[in-house]
Image (spheres, rainbow, N blue to C red):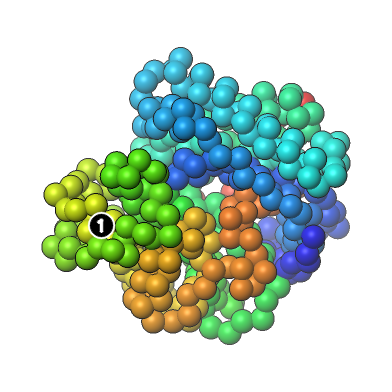
Amino acid sequence: MTAAAASPAFSSSVPAETPVFRWAVGLMSGTSLDGVDAALIHSDGRRVAAFGPAHTRPYPPDVRDAVRAILGERGGEDAIAAVERTLTDIHAEAVEELLAAAGLTAAEVAAVGFHGQTINHRPQDRHTRQIGDGGRLAARLGCPVVYDFRTADVRAGGQGAPLVPVYHQALCAGHDASGVTAVLNIGGVANVTVLADGAAPLAFDTGPGNALLDDWALRHTGVAVDRDGALARQGQVDATALTRLMEHPYFSRRPPKSLDRDDFAALARCVDGLSAVDGAATLAAFTVEACAQARVWMPEAPTRWLVCGGGRHNPALMAALRQRLAVPVDPVEVLGWDGDALEAQAFAFLALRHLDGLAQTFPETTGCPAPMGGGRLAMP
């Protein structure tokens, strides 16, 4: 277990009482639909004293298919409820396995931060939905569970995303750095946190992450990932299709802004006539170009990009980002962070902030009207 940041994040929101460091578990199942990440941190919700172990529990293929079938809240409430029960139990198993590996009991954990699985995200309609039964999880684990992190922000007029910038700031506070740092998470959707000394973090979804590429790979290879960028590296980018993709109105909207996993799905059909490799190359280029275009909304261009999430494992994406951004682009492991566990860690951090009544979302990160708390607490 390694030490991490020791400076407060968004210090104006910190109450006067002395913070207490506690163990917390975070759970994240992202828009890539690949499984559950569980991670343990020792934190006071302002700083991170230590990272515990992390664990990934993949979704079985039938569960992944069942989740895909209810995206957009399709299939009716009975189908959604059945998937929710299954997913909640998979999350419980992930926590149990993590605690066993850490040598901790549930009684030694202050809270579990349970993101749940997003099946619909329409902040323009003040609606978002992450399935996951917090009460069921708390009862099984025997410890407090904080869940439903996004709804309050969306109902107040915020985007409900990204939620991790306050954690990114806490981590970066422990590292001396000049210039502007962009922390880029490439999951199913990609989002960025922009950190500059003396300024509140700016955050927003940049555009597609892995979702379009994963869906393309599944259709053409039967495997829901372009492993090691094998398809994209063999193909040629179709410039006409890429131009059309970048004409999506999302890119002209000023942040804060966020996306649903499938917001680009209809437009992405413009690559359907391409070969498997050229389609993959074009969709990978779309993710990269969306990140590059995001710089127009930043007060200063980042001097370095730190990449977390599954996309950093794709050599084709990482090479293209380095070429297109023309500044250092590195996986977050260069700072000793775990890029696969970082989002799960963030929800442990947010759970502790919930317990202490600290803000989680901010006008600069989600567009909410004022710093807001989030989440609901379920007791065992």
Question: Is residue 248 something one can see in this rendering?
Answer: no
Q: Quadrant of residue 92?
A: top right
350 vs 195: above or below: above
Query: Mark 1 highlights which residue?
Result: 277
How many callouts does the rendering have? 1
Q: Residue at x 54, y 68 (%)?
A: 331
Q: Quadrant of residue 196?
A: bottom right
Residue 363 pos. (x, y %): 50, 57
Label 1 neighbour load within 10 Å: few <14, some 14-19, many 20+: many
Q: Secondary structure at mark 1?
A: helix
Q: Residue at x 58, y 84 (%)?
A: 178
Q: Residue at x 62, y 31 (%)?
A: 90
313 vs 373: above or below: below
Residue 8 pos. (x, y %): 72, 65
Left or right of 84: which side holds 3? right
Residue type beneath disc 1: Val
Left or right of 221: which side holds 107? right
For the N terminus, the quadrant is: bottom right
Judging depth in this view, the residue of 350 and 10 nearest the camera is 350
Q: Quadrant of residue 190?
A: bottom left
Residue 102 pos. (x, y %): 81, 47
Question: Is residue 145 something one can see in this rendering?
Answer: yes
Q: Residue at x 22, y 65 (%)?
A: 237
Judging depth in this view, the residue of 271 and 85 nearest the camera is 271
- Among all residues in the image, which is located at the extreme bottom? 178
Residue 48 pos. (x, y %): 75, 61
For the C terminus, the quadrant is: top right
